[in-house]
Image: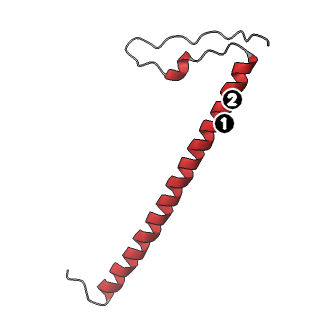
Amino acid sequence: MGRCACSPVPPARKGRKADPMENVYLIGAEQVKSASHRMVEAAEVVKGAAEQISSAVDRLRAALEEHAARVEAAASAGRLNP
């Protein structure tokens, strides 16, 4: 396998917490390939989490709209005390 001539990322500035990704050094093509597979897997996990959050928000929105409709119906029927 060939070598990758990657230069190191400069260290974090004084007083600033280092980003963990600043410490990733790729040496060869196999490591680049492996890293890309891990990034794809991580992206799929993030996508799944985003879809679950979106679904939960949609269910919450529907429940709130249903509740608001019941409150409006009760208010128009005079069943709510001001």
Q: Residue at horizontal 30%, vertical 84%?
A: 75
Residue toward you, 71 or 42: 42
In contact (CB < 8 Å): disc 2 and disc 1: yes
Quadrant occupied by the N terminus: top right
Residue 29, percent from left and from top:
75, 18
Counting the numbered discs, the total is: 2
Residue 28, percent from left and from top:
72, 14
Q: Which mark is residue 36?
A: 2
Q: Residue at horizontal 61%, vertical 39%?
A: 43
Residue lying furthest left: 82
Find residue 79 and report its image quarter.
bottom left
Residue toward you, 75 or 50: 50
Q: Is residue 76 left or right of residue 60?
A: left
Residue 35, percent from left and from top:
66, 26
Residue lying furthest bottom: 77
Q: Residue at horizontal 56%, vertical 53%?
A: 51
Find residue 71 and report its image quarter.
bottom left
Residue 57's place in the image compared with 37, above or below, is below
Amino acid type at circle 2 is Ser
Q: Which mark is residue 40?
A: 1
Q: Is residue 73 left or right of residue 22?
A: left
Q: Residue at horizontal 42%, vertical 75%?
A: 66
Check disc 1 and report its element: helix, strand or loop: helix
In this figure, which colouring scheme has been used for the structure?
secondary structure
Residue 3, percent from left and from top:
75, 10
**Label 2 environment density (alpha carbons within 10 Å; few <14, some 14–19, many ≥20):** few
Amino acid type at circle 1 is Val
